[in-house]
Amino acid sequence: MFSVLNKPTTTSYVTPAFSVQAQSPDPASLTAKATPRALATVANQLWAVKVPQPYDAFLVLDVEATCFQGTDFQWPNEIIEWPVCLLRWSDKGSNGMAGTLHKVAEFRSFVKPTWRPVLSSFCTSLTGITQEQVDAAPHFPEVAGQFSLFLAQHGLIHPETGERLVRFCWCTDGPFDVRDFVVKQCFISNIAIPHWLRGDVMDVRKVVSTWSETGRAQTSKVRPCPSPPLPRRMSPNIEKQLRFLGLAPFEGRQHSGIDDSRNIARIIVELARRGIRLQPNTPIKPGRRWPWMGKSGQVLEVHCSSIPRY
């Protein structure tokens, strides 16, 4: 059952575990209201540095997954939240030059785990996701199908063939979301990695760290850098990236997938404004295997015996 919420610039389609939100920016209202946030938005647009940008859209993903205290990335985590922010250029010319990104839509769905269907208290405390929310959610293959419809609705893939219609790039904070969580989840669900998720991704954390070391001198001529370079070999989390780029603090709840995705999107928008070329920088190996992987989605319990079921 779908319900429609009507607002001047926002249309939302909502089900208990799945929602799509499309947003249309209204530049005229920004100057009319003349709020500090609106003025900052206008100022950022004026300061945007246009450079050749090879991709037309960006899908910002930060999943949440099952976990127990003491587990690491070697454990068979199952995805329990699939949140994505869609970014598009508002000023890209026929020559590919662009500098201003906007968030135009969001997708969010909770996901019902199958191998360990009961969340640990540690997982709920960390992510804020409740047992009731995942119990009412679809399993991952269904979520993937719903997300395919979202991509088609926004003109990223063909609704029938699934062929990519524009060049879009997946963006994550670190390599973990696709490299680890998606590959594991597709194995546990016994499905192939969706065609719209294949290929390399852009690790935003790596982009910020690299720019800290090599790109500051170029953009400082446009606008003074607000903070000193990040320490070498540092892997900054979302909060530190925001601070380093001189942006407002983290908005929302940390380790909420949708809030994490929104804040990563803010970072990407700022990187684009500073004239940084946005493109994949991290390879994904869909055939990667872990010791606990058996046949056809089977999780070998012998490799997980030290972890409680609940």
Image (tube, rainbow, N blue to C red):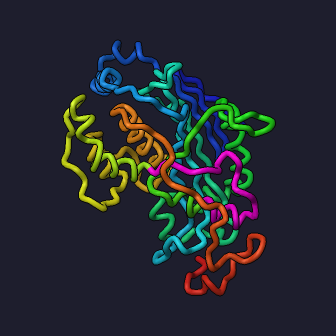
Where is the C terminus found, in terms of image quarters? bottom right
Quarter of the image where one finds residue 181: bottom right
Q: Point out the image quarter for the N terminus.
A: top right
Q: Is residue 185 left or right of residue 262?
A: right
- Considering every residue shown, the one lying at the far right of the view is 160
The residue under the point 41% across, 44% down is: 263
Q: Nearer the viewer, residue 232 or 299?
A: 232
Q: Taking 217 as reference, is 44 above or below it?
A: above
Is residue 27 part of the magenta span, yes or no? no
Using the image as rendered, state which of residue 269 and residue 287 is in the foreground. 287
Relative to 236, 198 lies left or right:
right
Q: How far from the left and from the top, in percent, is residue 270?
A: 36, 36
What is the tally of numbered marks visible in this picture?
A: 0
Q: Quadrant of residue 105?
A: top right
Position of 33 with respect to 112 (left or right) is: left
Which residue appears at 48% of the width and 59% of the height?
127
Magenta span has 183? yes
Location of residue 215 in the rendering, given as x and y in whole percent from the top left corner: 29, 42
Residue at 61% from the left image edge and 53% from the top image edge: 110
Which portion, as a residue range, is magenta?
182-203
Instruction: Answer with left or right where residue 142 lies relative to residue 263.
Output: right
Q: Position of residue 88 (x, y in %)?
A: 52, 30
